Image: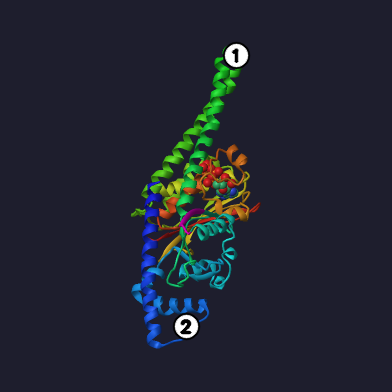
């Protein structure tokens, strides 16, 4: 909320600065026009072009304001036709929209109604503008009326759009996250409570029922514990993400340790760890164990028994700057449908929530992997095809 107040204040200051600087630009333009005795163009678009190119782009002081502005400034005439777009607005909406009706770039009934209101009441209006096509965008729009640098016409409309998309997205992400966590914790808790009610109520003397329910309750409690552990781990990694670990770590040792940890499960597969040489990178041993444990755990969970799981390491072939090594973990499991690939590292995302839940998954493993790899300034590459298998590559800078 405080952030929004500050940003709103910043917007108002920016508008004042723009309008004041606009006056100066106009004065300079008028003076030069007189000296040069140039014929005033009949065409307003042409006039706008001249001012933009000569006065703003060539003048570092004036250009500094409108050219550098990330927000969008759109000037309309009283017919709502676009007469001017600052460079960022031109970038966003395309310069071909100059001269066209505002509805060609922003077909939003509320916005058009508010523009009419501003024209009639001659008062500034501000409004929220949410667009969902092609992707979610959120703007605060200030609609002002009055003479400006581009026209002496008092019916000129100035639309100032401040982009709040990232802030609104972050707020939405937070509330989605809380909803997801609550849901994930509530499910096992409700089930434990149900069993407790049964064995303390009508089944209190039923030893058979107690024998059956207690292990299920323990399993649900384990699920809650592992969810909380993952959440704590994620929040700790996020806090430390800006500090790159500096220890000298041998990837051979990390992967062999991970293979030992998962030995019991890996015995059921055709598992091959082909790392025979030392590969030293800059990192944090425990966190790297967490990365490869999560990846191997997925290969085990999402492959049928006896399928191949293979681990390799060699010269880097990713986008990491400088000399690097690449670790690859390849399985022949159920794979991931191509359209779901970009979402695999999102918190709580599971391709098939029911199936993943059955094998004890909460959808946090790959989010943890992504954050740890980012902290190492490495790169995570996921290749997969439904029904044929998955290959996860992690690229790291050499020590
Ligand atoms: N090797 C893989 N093969 C097939 N699907 C995979 C593989 N790795 C990940 N996935 C898919 O990506 C989803 C997200 O993986 P992630 O590791 O984040 O969560 P999870 O395994 O469901 O739960 P958790 O790791 O928290 O126990 C999985 O639910 C699964 O659908
Ligand atoms: Mg997992």
Name the residue at the right extreme.
387
- Above/below status of 47 relative to 125: below
- Is residue 265 visible in the rendered image? The answer is yes
Q: CA distance from mark 1 to mark 2?
A: 94 Å
> Between 172 and 297, which is closer to the camera in this rendering?
172
In the image: residue 288, left or right of residue 129: left
* Magenta highlight range: 122-128
Mark 1 Cα-neighbour bin, 10 Å: few <14, some 14–19, many ≥20: few
- Above/below status of 30 relative to 87: below
Secondary structure beneath dot 1 equals: loop
- Above/below status of 49 relative to 4: below
Q: Residue at x 49, y 42 (%)?
A: 175
Rendered location of residue 280, percent (x, y): 39, 57
In the image: residue 113, left or right of residue 52: right
The reply to whether dot 1 and dot 2 touch (C-beta < 8 Å) is no
Give the label, 1 or 2, closer to the camera. 2
Q: Tell me, for residue 40, which label it has, or none.
A: 2
Rendered location of residue 300, percent (x, y): 57, 45
Which image quarter holds the C terminus? bottom left
Q: Residue at x 55, y 59 (%)?
A: 116
In the image: residue 128, left or right of residue 101: left
Rendered location of residue 103, percent (x, y): 59, 63
**Count of numbered labels shown in the rendering:** 2
Image quarter of residue 193? top right
20 in the magenta segment: no
Give the residue number, with chain letter if any, for mark 1: 202
Rendered location of residue 184, percent (x, y): 53, 36
- Is residue 270 visible in the rendered image? The answer is no
Mark 2 Cα-neighbour bin, 10 Å: few <14, some 14–19, many ≥20: few
Q: Earlier in the sequence, mark 1 or mark 2?
A: 2
């Amino acid at each position: 909320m405080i952030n929004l107040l500050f940003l709103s204040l910043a917007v108002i200051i920016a508008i004042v600065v723009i309008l004041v600087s606009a006056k100066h630009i106009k004065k300079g333009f008028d003076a030069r026009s007189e000296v040069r005795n140039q014929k005033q163009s009949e065409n307003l678009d042409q006039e706008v072009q001249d001012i933009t190119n000569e006065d703003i782009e060539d003048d570092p002081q004036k250009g500094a304001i409108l050219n550098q502005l990330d927000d969008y400034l759109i000037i309309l005439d009283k017919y709502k036709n676009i007469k001017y777009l600052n460079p960022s607005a031109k970038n966003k909406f395309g310069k071909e929209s100059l001269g066209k009706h505002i509805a060609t770039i922003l077909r939003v009934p509320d916005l058009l109604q508010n523009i009419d209101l501003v024209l009639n009441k001659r008062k500034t209006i501000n409004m929220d503008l949410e667009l969902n096509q092609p992707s979610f965008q959120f703007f605060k729009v200030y609609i002002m009326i009055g003479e400006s640098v581009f026209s002496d016409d008092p019916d000129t409309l100035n639309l100032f759009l401040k982009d709040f998309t990232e802030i609104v997205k972050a707020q939405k992400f937070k509330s989605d996250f809380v909803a997801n966590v609550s849901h994930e914790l509530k499910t096992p808790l409700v089930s434990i409570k149900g069993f407790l009610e049964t064995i303390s109520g009508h089944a209190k003397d039923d030893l058979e029922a107690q024998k059956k329910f207690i292990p299920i309750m323990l399993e649900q409690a384990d699920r809650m514990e592992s969810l909380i552990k993952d959440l704590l781990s994620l929040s700790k990694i996020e806090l430390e993400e800006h500090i790159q670990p500096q220890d000298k770590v041998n990837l051979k040792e990390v992967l062999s340790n991970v293979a030992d940890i998962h030995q019991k499960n890996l015995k059921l597969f055709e598992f091959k760890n082909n790392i025979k040489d030392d590969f030293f990178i800059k990192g944090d041993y425990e966190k790297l164990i967490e990365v490869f444990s999560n990846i191997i755990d997925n290969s085990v969970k999402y492959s049928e028994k006896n399928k191949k799981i293979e681990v390799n390491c060699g010269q880097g072939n990713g986008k990491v700057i400088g000399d690097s090594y690449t670790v690859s973990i390849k399985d022949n499991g159920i794979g991931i449908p191509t359209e779901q690939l970009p979402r695999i590292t999102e918190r709580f995302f599971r391709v098939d929530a029911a199936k993943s839940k059955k094998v004890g998954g909460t959808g946090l493993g790959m989010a943890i992997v992504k954050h740890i790899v980012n902290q190492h300034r490495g790169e995570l590459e996921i290749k997969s095809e439904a029904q044929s298998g998955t290959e996860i590559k992690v690229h790291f800078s050499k020590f």
